[in-house]
């Protein structure tokens, strides 16, 4: 090719004249590398999304189990409150309020751990690199042996980083509140069904 604008035309001519020939230009190689990196990035995002959903579901289930277990351990306390006149809806509000507070505390701790993880990734994250070999100016017809070409490499380095967006903090707090409400609702309904008689027997 005499210049860069004629590469595409020359590629088409070679593929037309030479049967079963595949001609790759530097643009094709660059596109291939970019496509591979894009696919890897997409897979990483999908995997992170699924892992986040699994962890979130596990956190909700764990919160519900701990809240229910706490209600079972507090049978004497909650049953006694019902015996002295607390209504069921008041007991439910009490358990839900405690659960939401615990959820907010857990959310704050989770945000702190997440920021620490982001700092670690940004400080010590690995660098992904890819190189593309490309043909430089041909030497044939310019004082060098015909048909010889110089090979050059373009290196592409991508630093693995983790970013923090403001909406992530809002999501963390929202999930903490939702988890607390869900766990508190399950535990509160269980507490509301406690019998004062059982509490009085345990006191005796």
Image (cartoon, grey):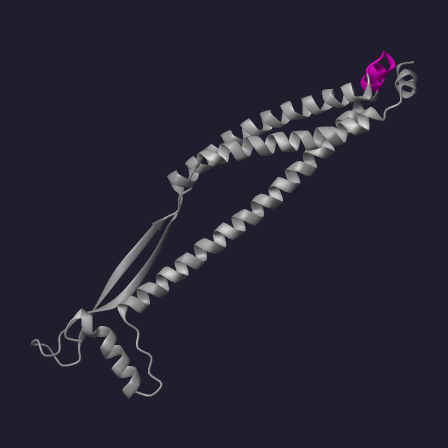
Q: Residue 196 location in percent, x, y?
A: 89, 19
For residue 61, which quarter of the picture?
A: top right
Decide which of 142, 30 is in the foreground and name it. 30
Which secondary structure type mostly characterizes the magenta part of the structure? helix
Image: 91 above or below 154 = above
Residue 176 position (above or below residue 82): below
- Residue depicted at x 26% and y 60%: 154
Left or right? Give the position of 120 relative to 184: left
In this view, the residue in front, 121 or 76, is 76
Q: Is residue 44 above or below residue 163?
A: below
Extent of the magenta region:
76-86
Quarter of image, res 35: bottom left
User: In the image, what residue occupies the spot 92% across and 17% down?
Assistant: 201
Q: Judge whether 38 appears above or below 169 on screen.
A: below
Give x and y (percent) for residue 75. Answer: 83, 22
Residue 85 covered by magenta stretch: yes
């Amino acid at each position: 090719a005499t210049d860069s604008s004629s590469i595409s035309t020359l590629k088409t001519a070679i593929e037309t004249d030479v049967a079963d020939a595949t001609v790759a230009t530097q643009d094709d190689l660059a596109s291939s590398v970019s496509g591979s990196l894009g696919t890897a990035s997409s897979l990483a995002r999908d995997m992170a999304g699924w892992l986040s959903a699994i962890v979130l579901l596990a956190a909700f289930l764990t919160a519900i189990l701990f809240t229910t277990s706490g209600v079972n351990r507090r049978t004497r306390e909650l049953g006694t409150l019902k015996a002295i006149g607390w209504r069921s809806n008041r007991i439910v509000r009490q358990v839900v309020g405690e659960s939401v507070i615990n959820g907010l505390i857990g959310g704050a701790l989770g945000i702190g751990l997440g920021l620490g993880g982001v700092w670690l990734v940004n400080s010590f994250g690995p660098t992904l690199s890819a190189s593309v070999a490309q043909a430089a100016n041909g030497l044939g017809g310019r004082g060098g042996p015909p048909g010889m070409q110089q090979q050059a490499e373009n290196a592409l380095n991508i630093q693995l980083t983790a970013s923090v967006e403001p909406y992530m903090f809002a999501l963390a707090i929202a999930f903490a509140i939702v988890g607390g409400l869900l766990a508190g609702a399950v535990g509160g309904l269980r507490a509301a069904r406690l019998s004062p008689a059982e509490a009085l027997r345990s006191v005796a």
